[in-house]
Amino acid sequence: MTTNVFENVPIDKVQSYWDRRPCNIRHSPVQIGTREYFDQVEQRKYFVEDHIPAFANFSQWQGKRVLEIGCGIGTDTINFARAGALVTAVDISGESLRIALKRSEIYGLQDCITFLQGDSEELSSFVPVMPYDLVYSFGCIHHTPHPWRVIDEIKKYMAPDSELRLMVYSKASYKLFWIMKEDGVWDMSKMDELIAKNSEAQTGCPVTYTYTFDEARELLNGFEILDLHKAHIFTWDIEAYKRYEYKKDANWANVGDARLAELEKELGWHMLIRAKLETTTHAKKSTF
Ligand SMILES: C[S@@+](CC[C@H](N)C(=O)[O-])C[C@H]1O[C@@H](n2cnc3c(N)ncnc32)[C@H](O)[C@@H]1O
């Protein structure tokens, strides 16, 4: 069962954390807001998180409606729009949205994307309720104090054929071992606070939930899970990575691709979920 350890964190703290340093903002050293900057951000993101394009499968959503929750500076948002989707993209961070909007203008995609600022726990208070073909949320809802509220909101935007693609952090991961080793703390009762402190590029994230497979299934009550698996171990030397150089961390230098893929299934940091509403959930919704 998920422990709701972050449920008393004020949402303002979450917003100001992401405003201070939007996710992936340092993915390129060149001037923020230029085309070169955005090209480099995308290149780096899909290089180190190379499971994303296959998970999102952008081209599948051509001509479809996509609702993205927690778009950050918009790397995936742009790729949905580029593939021909009509996108509504939401984030609580005004600073992230400002950059994402600029990005859409640079690529001439602004007419395909509606950016809206707000707390996804209250999605229906600022995003008109209508069915979307895809509700997509990559790495967002584990950063909000009440992720289960977001899941309840998402249901309002789903028809029987709609799909949810969701990434939440997984609990048993190489990342957890790495964090515990770095901090020298192996007290498993401190796991949640240790992870939150170290989960992002900027230390001290106010909220970072993680999930076991069972907890993810519990979170997605009312959904039929189509696929659920772990992916992504960060295997790069961090100091070199900060210099925009890619050298394998010594712990991974002698691990081949096939072995890495096996380990990612067990110890990956990203839990990737594809789901649809259960038929009964949809029937219940339509009786309102
Ligand atoms: C780790 S970033 C991921 C951004 C983007 N999906 C990506 O993969 O680059 C998490 C994002 O979730 C947003 N976020 C956190 N809590 C939120 C909430 N309650 N409502 C809307 N957005 C939220 C943050 O502002 C941040 O941009």
Image (spheres, rainbow, N blue to C red):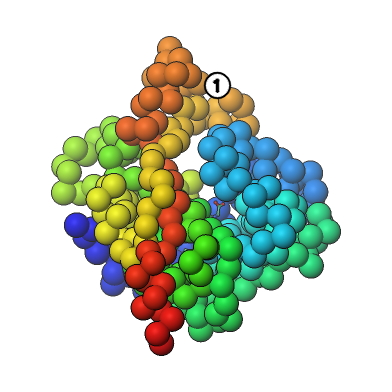
Q: Quadrant of the N terminus?
A: bottom left
Residue 168 place in picture, x, y as percent: 40, 52
Q: Is mark 1 within 8 Å of ligand 1?
A: no
In front here: 228 or 226? 226
Query: Where residue 54 sits in the image (x, y, percent)?
Result: 57, 40
- The quarter of the image holding the C terminus is bottom left
Mark 1: amino acid: Lys
- From the viewer's perspective, tell me whether residue 190 is left or right of residue 76: left
Give x and y (percent) for residue 23.
55, 53
Q: Nearer the viewer, residue 48 or 96?
A: 48
Q: Residue at x 46, y 32 (%)?
A: 234
- The image shows residue 200, relative to residue 176, as above or below, that is below
Near mark 1 (Cα within 10 A), the count class, few <14, some 14-19 or many ≥20, is some
State the residue lying farthest toward the top: 254
For the point 25% across and 50% down, the residue is 214
Observer able to see residue 92 = no
Foreground residue among 261 and 14: 261
Number of dots carrying numbers: 1
- Dot 1 lies on which element? loop
Up-down relation of residue 282 to residue 268 (above or below): below
Residue 115 in sight: yes
Between 52 and 184, the one nearer to me in the picture = 52
Q: What is the quadrant of residue 99 in the picture?
A: bottom right
Vertical comparison of 3 with 259: above or below:
below
Task: From the image, tell me which residue sits under label 1.
Answer: 247
Residue at the location (30% across, 50% down)? 211
Q: Position of residue 236 (x, y in %)?
A: 50, 27
